[in-house]
Image: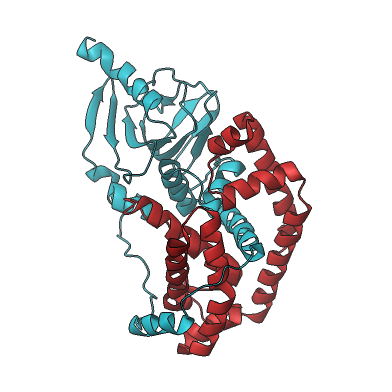
Chain colours: A red, B cyan
């Protein structure tokens, strides 16, 4: 997937982009709907996300995470922009503002792929109470206090479950770079 | 810069998830612009978002991709530009649109008793409270509890409270149970960005400062 983004960046490869679109647009749409967008808005935001992938492909490099992580950050930011409209402060650009690089060393691509797959594994092995708060945070868009309200738990319990989940995720990827 | 006080990992997770409220996000965003360690943590936490998004059942996208490609081809100027950076700035880049590039150019409003502030605009949907606060050297803030979470990012000088010393780049991450009485550094004073999850109780903090002066 990182390779496809690099092809888009290097020569505006529309076949590479078509593959990215087919893979990610339906998932971004799903993500937006999960967060409460109606299907039309979700569709628009998915299109906008992929358009941003096309336009910003040159800024992608492995220090921004795997391809799916980078696309997640674009989708997340577009959703926030849409919700808040005209936010007076600026979110950091996706992947912050390090030097852009089109020549991602292959070993970094491998490391990113490994990181992504370990994160995936940890998520599936989290105890249900931790997995629940993570999912409410990422996929329902709830703040700590909203999660506490929803689950009828003290705020401190919500935060400590998130900390525990975070600890496991961090341990799983610690030795990578 | 030697940053020793960081946001709680649950706060970073919520930020990476896109679920932290707007005012609190502004503070975290300013902090990670100054703190490479937290920027790395956020990157890992964004991988969680990527992994969760990847696992969602795809929903068919009705419009065909060629339409997007057509639009994309129109936008053929690839966006490689870095954000404009101002030389001689002491405000983290993401906050510059909000605060301006230099702390010296801020036009403070006096609250009295060695405290100045500038309330900052949030989007219309934004809840909570975001403001810059300047506290004179050695000045103590009144005791206060918090309505919900409160995040403070030090931009200049330092302050001290029961939880420790806070210097430029440090974040104090307090929940609603915390009571503290920060005292600004006796030589430098302190300028900070404070975000609060709720508006009402934060206002009452300022109420307590202003009230003695206005004779209420």
Residue B145 in the image: x percent, y percent? 47, 21
Residue B51 in the image: x percent, y percent? 65, 62
For image coordinates 33% across by 16% down, the residue present is: B208
Counting labels gives 0
Q: Which quadrant of the rendered structure holds the C terminus of chain A? A: bottom right
Depth check, front residue: A151 or B3: A151
- Would residue B166 be found to the left or right of residue B156 on screen? right
Against B109, is B209 above or below? Answer: above
Q: Is residue A95 at least partly visible in the picture?
A: no
Residue B150 in the image: x percent, y percent? 47, 33
For image coordinates 39% across by 81% down, the residue present is: B72
Q: Is residue B2 at least partly visible in the picture?
A: yes
Depth check, front residue: A139 or A55: A139
Depth check, front residue: B102 or A32: A32
For image coordinates 72% across by 66% down, the residue present is: A117
Residue A114 picture quarter? bottom right
Depth check, front residue: B158 or B31: B31
Residue B126 in the image: x percent, y percent? 37, 43
Against A112, is B119 above or below? Answer: above
């Amino acid at each position: 997937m990182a390779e496809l983004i690099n092809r888009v960046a290097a020569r505006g490869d529309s076949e590479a982009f078509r593959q990215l679109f087919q893979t990610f647009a339906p998932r971004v749409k799903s993500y937006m709907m999960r967060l409460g967008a109606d299907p039309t808005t979700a569709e628009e935001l998915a299109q906008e996300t992929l358009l941003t992938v096309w336009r910003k492909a040159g800024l992608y490099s492995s220090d921004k995470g795997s391809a799916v992580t980078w696309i997640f950050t674009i989708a997340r930011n577009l959703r926030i922009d849409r919700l808040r409209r005209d936010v007076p402060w600026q979110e950091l650009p996706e992947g912050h503002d390090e030097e852009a690089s089109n020549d991602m060393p292959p070993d970094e691509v491998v490391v990113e792929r490994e990181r992504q797959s370990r994160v995936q594994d940890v998520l599936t092995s989290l105890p249900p109470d931790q997995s629940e708060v993570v999912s409410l945070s990422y996929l329902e868009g709830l703040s700590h206090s909203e999660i506490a309200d929803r689950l009828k738990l003290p705020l401190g319990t919500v935060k400590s479950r998130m900390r525990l989940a975070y600890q496991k995720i961090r341990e799983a990827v610690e030795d990578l770079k | 810069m030697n940053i020793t006080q960081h946001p709680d990992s649950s706060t970073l997770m919520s930020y990476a998830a896109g679920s932290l409220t707007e005012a609190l996000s502004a503070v975290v965003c300013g902090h990670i612009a100054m703190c490479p360690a937290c920027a790395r943590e956020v990157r890992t936490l964004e991988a969680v978002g990527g992994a969760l998004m990847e696992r969602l059942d795809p929903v068919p996208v009705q419009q065909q991709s060629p339409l997007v490609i057509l639009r994309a081809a129109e936008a053929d100027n690839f966006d490689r530009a870095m954000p404009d950076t101002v030389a001689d700035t002491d405000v983290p880049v993401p906050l510059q649109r909000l605060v301006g590039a230099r702390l010296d150019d801020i036009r403070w409003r006096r609250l009295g008793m060695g405290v100045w502030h500038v309330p900052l605009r949030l989007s219309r949907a934004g809840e909570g409270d975001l403001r810059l606060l300047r506290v004179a050297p050695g000045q103590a803030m009144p005791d206060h509890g918090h309505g919900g979470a409160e995040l403070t990012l030090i931009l200049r000088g330092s302050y001290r409270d029961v939880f420790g010393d806070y210097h430029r780049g440090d974040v104090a991450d307090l929940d609603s149970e915390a009571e503290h009485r920060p005292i600004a550094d006796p030589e430098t004073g302190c300028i900070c960005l404070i975000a609060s999850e709720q508006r009402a109780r934060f206002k009452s903090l300022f109420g307590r400062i202003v009230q003695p002066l206005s004779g209420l």
